[in-house]
Amino acid sequence: MSAVQAEIEVHQTSIPVWLVWSVTFFFLAYGLGCYPILDNNEGLYAEIPREMLASGDWRHWIIPHLNGLAYMEKPPLLYWLTAISFAIFGENEWSARLVPAFSALSCVAMILWFGRQIERVTAARLAALMFITGFGVMAMSRTLMFDMLLTVFFTGAVMNGYLFSRSGAREKLNWSLGLLAFALLAKGFVAIILFVAVTFTYTALFSSSVSDFLKRIIAWFNPKALGIFLLIALPWHIAAILAEPIFAWFYFINEHVLRFLGKREPHDYYAGAWWYYLPRMVIYLFPWSFFLPVLLFVKTRNPCQRMLHIFLACAWIMPVLFFSVSSAKANYYLVVVMPLVALQLAIALEDRQFGRAWGRGLVGLVMALLFGALAWLASKQGTSQFSSLLVFGMQSMQFFQAFMISACIVSLCVALIVWRLPRLGIFPFAALPALILVGLIGVLQAAAQWTSTQPLVAELSAMKIKREVFLFRVFEHQSSLPFYLRQPVRVVESRSSDLFWGNKLHKNNIVISDMIFDKITDQQLVSLIVLDEDMPSFIDKKYVSKFKNSKKIGRSTLFMN
């Protein structure tokens, strides 16, 4: 294909920017607040900013509190922004998720901006669509967690860092280190480690000699840029050290060094094998991960484009390597590399004119076979513990089978479209993530009693007699409870990791013993929530005989004396 033909083909497969933003707003806004706050992580991170606002104490904005206890595991930027969202829009589900959604929106804007800077506008638009419709981002952009906020600041820092390395513009350096400081406040020192790993590696690969490498590294230590970084990053760290004497050891050593080494106390995280993230990369980028093999054949004679590919490869491979080496692993860490791997994949696809029409059609056929096989397996399954779950009026397995058949049909249609209409490129594959999003929202709505305490709180609110609510043992598995009750909840015989240090550092009446709870049940009416897995321990307690009434809700039982 000649250069002119290639240019025409790229123009034909270009994506209008209005379409990028339309798809982005759909994927971020659809169903954002129509399912309850999820237990465990989302419940934790929704309650902390709620308590910031409710406390009326400025010190809670320095040392965050969870369920009435000090919680110093993470930096405060996510809490601050979510508290502001609550103050403006009220304490509800969609306002709780506004920060990750807006972070994903900002990532799309950043990808488009960077595409203009490197003169790859068409590829950047495709990358933005691949990013926002990828399964991992679809989930993380609507879940209140730190990682999407880290992603936008880390992505901006490395992109501006690359532009500084290429042009030497001090303005880009200032932006790079300024955004890095916000990334530090978003997730902690992992942001600096990832940034240094990426920058050091591609600088070494760009350098023509040792002296050139040293010159490039020294250029990063600009007094003004470092001053911007310190001005943003230092104040909270200093304030936290002054407010809580143990903060320095706890935050810098226990939460960073010991977590990486797998020796953090308490040990409440998963280690995993060295290949832990490889299959998760495929899932996170689905359905675009079917095109990942294209990255194995990236070849360019243009020095600038070669530098760009080296940078993008470093920008997502180095974080994945770091996470793989670390003893603490979690699948959601991967979201931080999604903008960069999507951009490199889009550029590689554009360089190959998005492949041949029959090749794109073949990808759609493979997806159709995959979904068809899953639908067939679903038809062979019997009943399960979620058989009573109704999704769009169907039992869980019926819905799963119907969904897989629908996905199979959509995949076949996409295969036909990309084969017969080559000018559309691979954009029609976005129909699959749209279907997945609708199905996912339906499942989250139907599974509310298993994933959140909102139905349980609704049951408590319907009771004519008001009772104090207690949790038995594990707080995390029902962490949305204080958010929906609008107050901290006392925990009996706590086995909670997230309340461990808050309880250990200061005397409190939040975590109580069996003996104290036994006395309380003699003096007042209470409700006690017990998880299914804790039921054997509960029935052995001497105070169990005081609870005459109970009701099963999801995976918990509500007991009343």
Image: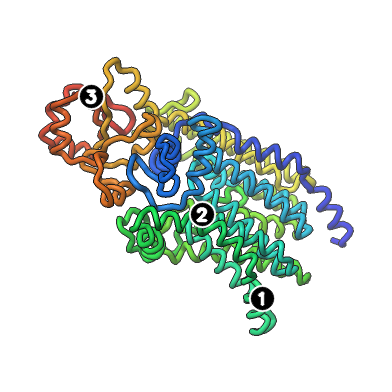
- Residue closest to the eye, 498 or 218: 218
Q: Is residue 513 left or right of residue 202?
A: left
Q: Amino acid at mark 3?
A: Ser
Q: In this view of the protein, can residue 341 be seen by the observer?
A: no
In the rendered image, the quadrant that contains the N terminus is bottom right
For residue 66, what is the image quadrant?
A: top left
Residue closest to the eye, 382 or 327: 327
Q: In the rendered view, tell whether residue 226 sits above or below residue 492.
A: below
Closest to the observer: 240 or 559? 240
How far apart are labels 1 and 2 at the CA level? 27 Å
Most distant residue in the right direction: 4
In the rendered image, the residue lying farthest to the left is 542
3 or 2: tag closer to the N-terminus:
2
Q: Quadrant of the C terminus?
A: top left
Q: Is residue 270 above or below residue 133?
A: below
Q: Which residue is mark 3?
A: 550
Q: Crowding near pointer 3: few (<14 within 10 Å), some, many (20+)?
A: some
**Residue that label 1 marks:** 216
Can you identify the residue that label 2 sits on?
Answer: 185
The span from disc 3 to disc 1 (Cα, nearest Å) is 68 Å
**Residue at the top extreme, as displayed:** 464
Residue sitting at x 60%, y 34%: 29
Q: What amino acid is found at the position of numbered circle 1 in the picture? A: Arg
